[in-house]
Image: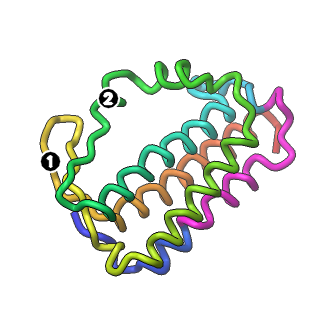
Amino acid sequence: MKAPDDQDSVLARYMEGPALLERALAGIQDTDLDAPPSQGGWTIRQIAHHIVDGDDLWKTCVKVALGNEQAEFSLEWYWTHPQEVWAKSWAYVNRSLDVSLALLQANRNHIHRLLGQVPDGWHRSVKFRKSNGETERLPVGAVVEMQAYHVEHHVKQIRAIRSEIGGV
């Protein structure tokens, strides 16, 4: 895997993620945050916490790659349980969003500034152990792009749920 060539564009999308999520949540009532979608799946509150917690996990991968390219990064401990178990273990249904949204913004600012200080940080990589046990080199730029997309993807889900429940 290689880092995307359009670093500035990807970084802009990455940095826009917290504002994109906040706009998707603007004016929402607590009852709408917890309304289950008609097709099943997570509530808006659960999706928002999933975005932030995932971003927090992948931030560690970026920091490992920037600090020790010889290291291996794995989420094996995370993949041992389905997403629903983590959502329950990490109390997605009970947590307020304010602290999570602040964490997302802080993590994004931290990584952005760190990338500005580490020469060639965008292309540094770490050996990543995939869920099937295989490893591949995973560059920082690819992780940043993945996390930019992750927010965009789930914001579309949030907007669809809001539209469905009439909370837009």
Residue at which label 2 appears:
77
Q: Which of 150 and 118 is in front in this view?
A: 118
Q: Residue at x 55, y 68 (%)?
A: 13
Quadrant of residue 122 within the rendered picture: bottom left
Q: Residue at x 44, y 72 (%)?
A: 115
Q: Give the range drawn in magenta.
A: 14-32
Q: In the rendering, at what x and y percent does residue 82 appear? A: 39, 23
Residue type at tag 2:
Trp
Q: Which residue is drawn at 73% across and 51% down?
A: 24
One can see residue 163 in this view: no
Q: Principal SS element in the magenta part?
A: helix
Residue type at tag 1:
Thr
Q: Which of 39 and 49 is in front in this view?
A: 49
How many marks the image carries: the answer is 2
One can see residue 71 in this view: yes
Residue 30 among magenta residues: yes
Q: In the rendering, at what x and y percent does residue 34 appear? A: 74, 26
Q: In the rendering, at what x and y percent does residue 44 appear? A: 68, 35
Q: How crowded is mark 1: few (under 14 residues within 10 Å), some or many (20 or more)?
A: some
Q: Earlier in the sequence, mark 1 or mark 2?
A: 2
Q: What element carries label 1?
A: strand
Q: Which dot, 1 or 2, sits closer to the camera?
A: 2
Residue at which label 1 appears:
135
Q: Is mark 2 on a helix, strand or loop?
A: helix
Does 51 appear above or below 113?
above
Does 38 appear above or below 44?
above
Quadrant of residue 96 within the rendered picture: top right
Direction from residue 116 to residue 105 in the image, left or right: right
Q: In which quarter of the image is the C terminus?
A: top right
Residue 25 among magenta residues: yes
